[in-house]
Amino acid sequence: MTRKGSIAQLIRKPRPGYIMGEDGCLVAFEESALEGLDPGELSVGDWVEYEKLDRMEERRASRIKTLIRRGEE
């Protein structure tokens, strides 16, 4: 299921980045989940579309695509 949210924290290796979903859930993501995006292109506050995966009580996002970059609103 596709969801929308905003980047809450950028990736800082070895830690994942986080998306705050419209549903209020914080979802982690790895660099490999970025579809055609360079991690350096993302900013906190950018709106993205993603698919949510639930893995062993840990929420993860996959197939992340940028919708609106901060400053383009």
Image (tube, grey):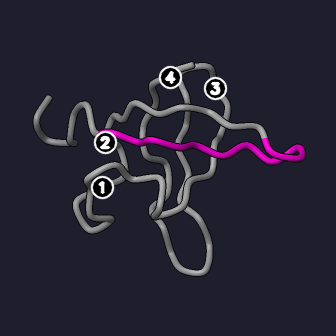
Residue 37: percent from the left, percent from the top? 27, 55
Label 2 element class: loop
Q: CA distance from mark 3 to mark 1?
A: 19 Å
Disc 1 marks a residue whose amino acid type is: Ser
Tell me what residue is drawn at x 31 percent, y 42 percent.
46
User: Which mark is drawn over residue 33?
Assistant: none
Closer to the eye: label 4 or 2: 4
Q: Nearer the viewer, residue 66 or 51?
A: 51
Q: Is residue 59 left or right of residue 24?
A: right
Q: Do the numbered discs 4 and 3 sit on residues whose CB atoms are within 8 Å?
A: no
If you read the primary sequence from the N terminus, does the residue marked by circle 3 or circle 2 appear first?
Answer: 3
C-alpha span from label 1 to label 4: 18 Å
Residue that extends furthest to the bottom in the rendered view of this protein: 14
User: Which residue position is annotated with label 3?
Assistant: 24
Q: Position of residue 41 (x, y in %)?
A: 22, 60
Q: Are the residues at dot 2 and dot 1 in contact (C-beta closer than 8 Å)?
A: yes
Q: The disc labelled 3 sits on which kind of residue?
A: Gly
Residues in magenta?
55-65
Marked residue nearer the N-terminal end (3 or 1): 3
Disc nearer the start of the sequence (4/2): 4
Residue sticking out furthest to the left:
72
Q: Which mark is residue 46?
A: 2
User: How far is mark 4 from mark 2, CA to CA?
Assistant: 14 Å
Marks 4 and 3, how far apart at CA: 11 Å
Look at the numbered disc 1 and give the secondary structure of its residue: loop
CA gap, disc 2 to disc 1? 6 Å
Q: Which residue is mark 4?
A: 3
